[in-house]
Amino acid sequence: MSKKLLVLNASPRSGGNCDVLCDEFISGAVDGGNKSEIINLRDKNINYCLGCLVCQSSGGVCAHNDDMSEVLDKMISSDVIVLATPVYFYSMCAQLKTLMDRTFAKYTQVKNKKFCLMSTAADNNDSAFDGTIQGFRNFLYCLSGSEEAGIILAGGVYEIGEIKNHKALEQAYKAGKNI
Ligand SMILES: Cc1cc2nc3c(=O)[nH]c(=O)nc-3n(C[C@H](O)[C@H](O)[C@H](O)COP(=O)(O)O)c2cc1C
């Protein structure tokens, strides 16, 4: 059955390595007959969570009136959510963490989803991704019925374009096709 996939790309660098990974994933998803959408978070205005808890007493309406409500509703209506982030200081980038924090308004509705993580780093050691993977898993731990459906890592890529021919591209394509 056709699934609804949402790719949330947190890289601030247009045309960078995460962009290429996301493109491969989406090409696989299209070939696999799935409906997919990508949102580049750099194109959205998403403010930091204020921790004010207004959302908890307002039926999920955040104190910020920005683009997150639209993104969150798309997360809720998706079957599969792909999170893409570069490694920054051995963790996920701030744009992805900000998105995670802002799901708080309706996080109980982000349930029974499959999640994939795609990440890039200059460091070529697998351990370079430990902090990012842990943060991803911590997020899933908070979301009811979430399933870790795949982790795709591209190490050893620093400059734009260095991801060309990386084995992670084939993995991203296959993950999109077979999800
Ligand atoms: C602020 C910043 C912090 C970074 N920190 C790390 C790091 O801790 N470890 C690492 O291996 N690469 C680090 N990098 C390199 C990026 O992870 C790498 O260039 C990645 O391919 C960028 O992906 P993008 O092109 O999708 O933005 C850092 C880059 C920036 C700009």
Image (cartoon, grey):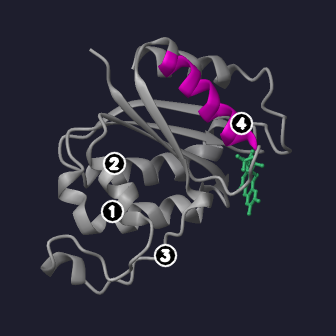
Q: Are marks 3 and 4 in contact (CB under 8 Å)?
A: no
Please name the amino acid that badge 3 sits on. Answer: Asn
Checking the image for residue 155, the label placed there is: 4
Per the rendered image, the range of residues in magenta is 16-30
Crowding at mark 1 (Cα within 10 Å: few <14, some 14-19, many 20+): many
Rounded to the nearest angstrom, the CA distance separating label 2 from label 1 is 9 Å
User: Which one is earlier in the sequence, the residue at label 2 or at label 1?
Assistant: 2
**Residue at 35% of width from left, 54% of height from top?**
139
The mark lying in front, picked from 4 and 2, is 2
User: Which one is earlier in the sequence, the residue at label 3 or at label 1?
Assistant: 3
Crowding at mark 3 (Cα within 10 Å: few <14, some 14-19, many 20+): some
Is residue 25 positioned above or below 127 on the image? above
User: Which one is earlier in the sequence, the residue at label 3 or at label 2?
Assistant: 3
Residue marked by disc 3 = 47
Residue 36 in view of the camera: yes
Q: Is residue 18 left or right of residue 124?
A: left
Residue marked by disc 1 = 103
Rounded to the nearest angstrom, the CA distance separating label 3 from label 1 is 12 Å
Q: Find out if the beta carbon at label 4 lies less than 8 Å from the nearest ligand 1 atom.
A: yes
Task: List x then y, in percent, for residue 158.
Answer: 82, 45
Crowding at mark 2 (Cα within 10 Å: few <14, some 14-19, many 20+): many
Residue marked by disc 2 = 75
Task: List x then y, in percent, for residue 14.
Answer: 74, 50
